Amino acid sequence: MVGPGWNRTVSLAGKGNPAGFWNRLTEDDQSAFKKLARSRTFAPRTRLIEAGEAGTWAAVLVKGTVQVLAADESRKIAVRRSADIIGEQAVLDGGVRSATVLAETVVEALVISRRDLEHLLHLRPQVTRLLVAIMSERLRESDGRQGGGPVVVRLARLIVALAAERGVQVGGRLHIRVNSQQALAATLGVARMSVVRGLDTLRREGLVTASRGLLVVHDLDGLRERPVR
């Protein structure tokens, strides 16, 4: 059951985080979400989400802040706070969690199961559109975040490093076995779709082609010298 402090907390969040998911919902959509969700409290340093696990729920933060960490926990990707939603990507795409989420403070959240969120989105397509918009914003945020330049440039550098480490010559081309695009994304600390777009750019430039578990390098020097475009 949702606690009585929920409306008061959201009111405060609205002043400091107008771009948060909750504050961009209509009152009717908020009410529908609350009917399907349950309230949970997490202590500081609790791992709300673990990279690699199945995405069975998402949550709106009512109070507190969390850190979003790269899959290997080598660096912080983002900070989420009251009115933000977490865990939605794996719920929507059916994949595993791509990052770990760690409570910085005491966190109160409204947790919604995959089934109930899917039901809500089916009944309220405007909420689906909002989630897609937020995911797109986060992808752009991830692409522009510091870390050596745009994702496609960092991806090119990573492939060069992997070629040196494990590349095998096959028919005049360098073949590199990789676990998955998700693994590449985790190494770079970005979303999987950022890697998908980066690989498509490199393919169009004639530098790399990708298939399941395999990268084929067509122009290693081109990858090394690829400028920011």
Image (cartoon, grey):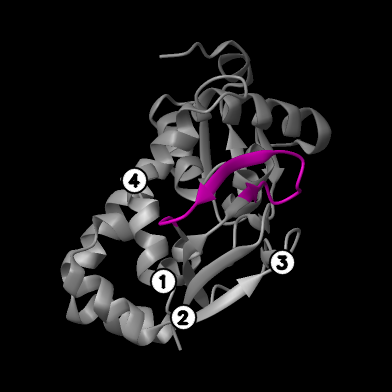
Q: Can you give x and y, in whole percent of width and height, for residue 50 in the image? A: 69, 64
Distance from Cα at disc 4 to Cα at disc 2 = 21 Å
Residue nearest the viewer, comparing 22 with 106? 106
Amino acid type indicated by mark 1: Trp
Q: Residues within 10 Å of mark 1 (few under 14, many from 20)?
A: some
The disc label shown at residue 6, or none: 1
Residue designated by label 2: 3
Q: Is residue 192 visible?
A: yes
Camera-side mark, 3 or 2: 2
Residue nearest the viewer, comparing 133 with 150? 133
In the image, the segment drawn in magenta is 67-84
Query: Which residue appears at 41% of the width and 24% of the height?
Result: 205
Distance from Cα at disc 1 to Cα at disc 2 = 6 Å
Lower sequence index among marks 3 and 1: 1
Picture quadrant of residue 166: top right
Picture quadrant of residue 8: bottom left
How many marks overall? 4
Q: Residue 141 colored magenta?
A: no
Element under disc 3: loop
Quadrant location, the C terminus: top left
Distance from Cα at disc 1 to Cα at disc 4 = 15 Å
Amino acid type indicated by mark 3: Ala
Amino acid type indicated by mark 4: Lys
Residue designated by label 4: 15
Lower sequence index among marks 1 and 4: 1
Residue designated by label 3: 43
